[in-house]
């Protein structure tokens, strides 16, 4: 593994700060304007996280060994941010491939679900939370779509997949795969903006710094996924200066978050039905993309 | 389609927030309507200590007692629900409602009122009973 | 001051910019509950002050209790209050929570809120206006002074104005 220092630092800083900035921007300029009100300040998510760090940690029935869960989750997201290019180069060049990234993303909900199972032993119906199953399905379809591109590029390494579409252009399988990945992302992003009970159902028993970590963690994972999507499917235009590339990448990521926020602001109640229809289309597209890629089209 | 119509109406409305405490367009202060029943205002220079407000109050909040030379008006308005019975019962017109709605208090003692006064001789309405 | 103290002060001051409230309704006419929810609507927009409604009491910084306490709901209230964080403000919203309200002398009433929980701030009104609730939240953070005192009702002057009849 050849790590690069400056791209690594930039990637980690972007994964730390950009999700909160994007959330603040969307809450003020998309959701608040759509609901005809002045929103919170632009840095409201930062104030929320800072305030949560000063609250007490309300652990009920969980042993202190589960202090590892936030640390492991943060490490997983940090490593995945290093494995994904964000306009400045790829820090973890030889060690990053799709299977590694998929397992890192899975580590977070698995750890969270284990924590929930072990902390509430008297309630077996609450064991596997709903968000985990939904999460697993949409993550898998996203990575299936990327796997279609990997099949065309004949490699699972990210540093080979990312420039492939840039050099070889859009073929049919890549186009269908991009549609599948886009839909998978929008379903997951819309869940963040939809409404309090659904958004926070899996966070309801946390408080204090633990809650701050998990409130940051899920947008950060989505940020990394959207960065991967943007770099694989829409790398154009490639500017000569790296600062321009970084800024353009962040703008593209923001542009991908906007449709989910927009739709969630107008119809938060009908989210579930639209989600199910989109999910059916999504499964078909992912399967079609994989089949076309295997056929060589 | 109805989603886009909804979006159109919401975006056309602009920003509708009243920016409390500064009001529309964040310039003038917020005031409730003229006949809003906010905090009570008791003018003890008009009070004749007839006790009709104390009888009329459904929550038994007002207590008028004579202590030596002076009369004391006491009211514990924690559970006042601003019905206006005391205002309508007072023959002198000593009780009225202001437009003050910012009534948050830190302790229950701040929500008690006490005033000592010398009652005036009442108007003809209250003199009939005496 | 060293870094640790600076970070502590920074985190505590962030509470002024982001206050998470959990309203709890213990029955009654639900007018105060509607006014609390009205404060979150676009017309009054408490979200621009950072105030957010959270659905779990563990996330809450301010606990807004409204409605007439009855013996049935009092036990539920105590259970919810036990899962609030230690550093929280309890606000009694409305005439019923502050002092028992209209039905204070009934046998079903469990009295005012301060017989069950230590109350930090009282918001009288039936129901208090949404702006009054926002003022109370600002008072609880220390941003605005309390405007009532023991003398705030009494006027001892030769008043010429007659009340509106």
Image (cartoon, rainbow, N blue to C red):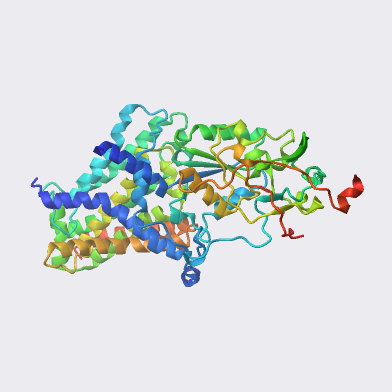
x, y percent for residue A114: 35, 34
The front one of A152 and A59 is A59
Tell me which residue sits at (31%, 28%) in the image: A65
- Please say if A1 is above or below A58: below
Residue A36 visible at all:
no
**Res C42 visible:** yes
Query: What residue do we see at 61% from left, 54% from top?
Result: B100
How far across and down, in percent of the image, does residue A191 sit? 40, 53
Q: Which of B99 and B25 is in front in this view?
A: B99
Question: Which residue is depicted at the point 44% across and 65% down?
Answer: A34
Total tally of numbered discs in the picture? 0
The answer to whether residue A27 is above or below residue C12 is below
Q: Is residue A19 left or right of residue A235?
A: right
Along the viewing direction, whichever of A125 and B122 lies nearer the viewer = B122
In this view, the residue in front, B53 or C154, is: C154
On the image, the x and y values in percent for residue B77 come to 67, 43
Outermost front residue: B69
Reply above or below: A94 against A71.
below
Q: In this view, does C89 lie to the left or right of C34?
A: left
In this rendering, the answer to whether C9 lies above or below A274 is above
Q: Which of the image's four quarters has the N terminus of chain A?
A: top left
Quarter of the image that includes the C terminus of chain A: bottom left
């Amino acid at each position: 593994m050849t790590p690069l220092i400056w791209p690594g630092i930039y990637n980690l800083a972007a994964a730390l700060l950009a999700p909160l900035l994007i959330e603040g921007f969307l809450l003020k300029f998309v959701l608040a304007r759509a609901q005809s009100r002045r929103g919170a300040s632009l840095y409201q998510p930062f104030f929320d996280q800072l305030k949560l760090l000063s609250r007490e940690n309300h652990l009920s029935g969980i042993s202190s060994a589960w202090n590892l869960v936030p640390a492991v989750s943060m490490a997983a997201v940090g490593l995945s941010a290093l494995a994904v290019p964000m306009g400045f180069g790829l820090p973890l060049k030889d060690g990053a491939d799709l299977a590694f990234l998929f397992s890192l993303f899975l580590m977070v909900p698995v750890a969270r679900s284990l924590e929930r199972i072990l902390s509430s032993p008297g309630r077996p119906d609450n064991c596997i939370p709903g968000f985990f199953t939904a999460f697993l399905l949409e993550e898998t379809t996203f990575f299936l779509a990327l796997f279609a591109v990997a099949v065309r590029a004949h490699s699972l390494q990210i540093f080979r997949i990312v420039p492939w579409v840039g050099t070889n252009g859009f073929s049919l399988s890549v186009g269908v795969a991009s549609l599948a990945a886009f839909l998978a992302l929008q379903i997951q992003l819309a869940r963040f903006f939809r409404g309090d009970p659904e958004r926070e159902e899996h966070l309801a028993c946390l408080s204090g710094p633990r809650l701050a970590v998990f409130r940051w963690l899920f947008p950060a994972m989505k940020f990394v996924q959207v960065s991967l999507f943007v770099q694989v499917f829409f790398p154009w235009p490639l500017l000569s200066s790296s600062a321009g590339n970084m800024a353009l990448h962040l703008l593209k990521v923001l542009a991908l978050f906007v449709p989910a926020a927009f739709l969630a602001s107008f119809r938060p109640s009908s989210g579930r039905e639209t989600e199910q229809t989109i999910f059916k289309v999504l499964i078909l597209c992912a399967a079609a993309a994989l089949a076309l890629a295997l056929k060589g089209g | 389609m109805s989603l886009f119509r909804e979006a159109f109406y919401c975006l056309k409305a602009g920003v509708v927030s009243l920016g409390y405490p500064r009001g529309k367009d964040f310039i003038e202060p917020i005031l409730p309507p003229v006949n809003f029943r906010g905090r009570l205002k008791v003018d003890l220079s008009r009070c004749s200590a007839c006790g009709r407000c104390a009888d009329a109050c459904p929550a038994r909040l007002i207590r008028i007692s004579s202590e030596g030379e002076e009369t004391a008006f006491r009211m514990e308005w924690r559970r006042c629900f601003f019905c206006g019975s005391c205002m309508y019962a007072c023959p002198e017109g000593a009780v009225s409602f202001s437009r003050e709605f910012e009534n948050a208090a830190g302790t229950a003692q701040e929500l008690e009122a006490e005033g000592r006064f010398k009652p005036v001789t009442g108007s003809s309405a209250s003199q009939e009973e005496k | 001051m060293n870094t640790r103290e600076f970070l502590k002060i920074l985190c505590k001051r962030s509470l002024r910019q982001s206050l998470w409230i959990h309203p709890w309704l213990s029955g009654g006419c639900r007018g105060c509950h509607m006014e609390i929810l009205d404060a979150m609507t676009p017309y009054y927009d408490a979200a621009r002050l950072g105030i957010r409604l959270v659905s779990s009491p563990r996330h809450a910084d301010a606990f807004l209790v409204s409605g007439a306490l009855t013996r049935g709901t009092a036990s539920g209230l105590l259970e919810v209050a036990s899962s609030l964080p230690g550093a929280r403000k309890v606000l009694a919203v409305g005439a019923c929570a502050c002092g028992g309200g209209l039905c204070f002398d009934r046998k079903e009433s469990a009295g005012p809120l301060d017989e069950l929980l230590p109350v930090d701030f009282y918001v009288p009104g039936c129901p208090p206006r949404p702006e009054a609730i926002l003022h109370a939240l600002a008072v609880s953070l220390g941003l605005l002074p309390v405007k009532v005192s023991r003398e705030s009702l009494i006027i001892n002057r030769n008043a010429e104005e007659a009340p509106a009849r």
